[in-house]
Every structure is written in structure tokens, then in C-alpha cells.
Image (cartoon, grey):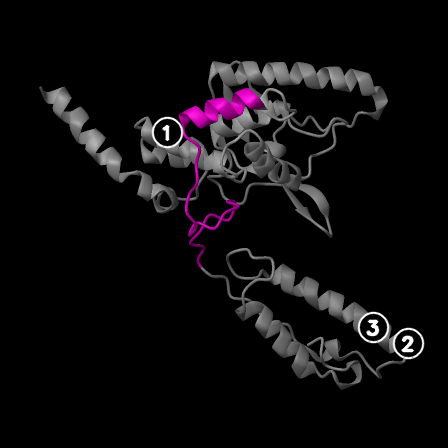
Amino acid sequence: MGAIPLEKLKPLHLQTFYKELIEGPRLDGKKGPLSQASLVYHHRVIHKALDTAVKQQLIPYNIADSVELPKIQKELITYDPDDEIDNTQAVKILDEQQVNYMLEKARETPYYALLFLAVRTGMRRGELLALRWKDIDERQKIIKVRQTIGYTPEKGIFFKAPKTKNSRRNIDVSEDAIKVLKNHRKQQHEKKLLLGPNYNDYDLVFCQDNGLPMHPDTISSWFPEFLERIGLPRLNFHCLRHTHASLLLKAGVDVKIISERLGHSSVRITYDIYSHLMPGMQRTAVEKLEQLLK
């Protein structure tokens, strides 16, 4: 549509553009259909631009007034909308030795507690960065996932509720995880005292030094470079979620429990993502059964 001269732009051109937005591949690379809200946003931007053109007498009237926005039919969601990956891609993980080595090296960075909790809980990046201290029950050793973080150029960084009921969940954690969090809180408190009134207290567990929310891309950009720097394969931050699931599978944990910990909207999603890790576990199950019956 950008190639059409402004004075030759017709309502049909806009209608065709909206149709292509709905039916074509998404420009942001995400899965699933474009939302009605996104379509309305595009229309408002175009309408405002054409209003300006009318005021400057570049065109006689705003053709967007003559365009009726199409209604987007909601499709059945066959993927987990809270996950940040393409489930058709190969799952990449770290093994036990690599995890221990990675965490040992991470002690020298500001992100040790964040990486430790990612491996121990399988929480998504947005869930970790939105985690508040009030969401952690140290006595019961439970983490409550109640919100996630997002970012758009229009809104900036913002908090939102999990998209599915299963994403809103409680995750049991170990005593070691609680100890790491307590130490992290102590370090955070020292920074808070140092900054005094300049500290922005959002009660966030993982945040910038001044208390403000961390941009989601900060850890995503840093993590692959960190792995490469310490001699490990260059993987994205989401690999820690996969690593958590794979280690649980290797330990013989039931897939339903793993699905609940990950907050998948259905067990089928967990099977779809990790089924390739399961064939060898059937052999292990047979061997355990034979030992039990001897």
C-alpha cells in the first residue's frame, strides 16, 4: 500500500490491506491470528495520518471513514499463548554438568539468583521478571505465579495477568532455592538503602538496581553471550525452561506434574514439546518394573 500515491488511495486499498494483515503471516513473527485490538490499532494510526493529510489539504476527505473493519474470527488455540517459543523448533537444553557449571560461573554475575530460579522452577522469562516478594511463601516453600511482564514500543514495560488459568499456578521449590532467594533479597536491600528515596519499590524480586522493572530483552540478550563466554553452547534464555522439564523427565517425574509446574494449558502441549525425550524413559520404566517384581 505504501507504493500508492496519497491522492490515488481508495477505500478498497485499505480494505485489501486489512485483509492481508488478517490472512498473511504476522509481521511480529508470533503464532496465532492477529487480534481484533491490533487491527483496530492499525486502523486508528492510518485514520489519524489521513486526518492530518486532510487538514493540510493534501486530500479532500479521509477515505478511512468509508472503510468498515473486518471482524476477525477467533480460532481454536492449539499452542500455549504464554510460551515464547515456536514449538516446531528443536528443544535445546543443558545437561546436569553444564547446569552446575553455568550456575557456578553465574555467581560472578548479577543474575545468579535469576538463573538459579529459572532452572529450579521452569518459569517463563516474563513470570520471573514480574515475580514479587509477596508471591513467595518462604515457610511453605511455594512460589505463586500471579502476573507476567510484557513490553511494546507503545506501552513500554507493563504487567499483565497470565493468559491461561493454568499459567496462574503455585510452584513448590526446594530449601536451596529459598536460601538463594533470601541471600538475593539481602543484596537487594543493601542497594535499596544505598539509593534511599531514589529507589523505586515495586516489590520485584528481579529488577534493575534502582528497583524499576527489568526490560525482558536485557536477560535475553545477555544470556547467550554469557554461555558463549564460559565455553557452553550459545542457547537462548528459554532453554532453561526446557532444561527444567528435561531434568524432571530424566528423574522419572510424571508428565502431568511437569505440565502443571510449567503452567501449560494442557498436558498435550507438554507431550508435543518433549515427546522426543521420552522414548528412552520407557525402557527405564520397564527395567524399574522388572526390578520391583523380582
Give the position of the C terminus as an image quadrant: top left
Quadrant housing residue 67? bottom right
Per the image, label 2 sits on a secondary structure element best described as loop
Q: Does the magenta stretch include residue 136?
A: no
Give me the residue at 58% from left, 73% from top.
20
Q: Mark 2 points at which residue?
A: 56
Q: In which quarter of the image is residue 277?
A: top left
The kind of residue on which mark 2 rests is Gln
Residue under pointer 1: 248
The three-letter amino acid code for the residue at tag 3 is Asp
Label 2–label 1 contact, CB within 8 A: no
For the stretch drawn in magenta, what is the main secondary structure? loop
Residue at horizontal 51 percent and vertical 56 percent from the top: 31
Q: Position of residue 243 (x, y in %)?
A: 43, 33
The residue drawn where x is 53% and y is 23% is 103
Q: Nearer the viewer, residue 95 or 207?
A: 95
User: Residue 195: x, y in percent?
Assistant: 82, 21
Residue found farthest to the left: 294
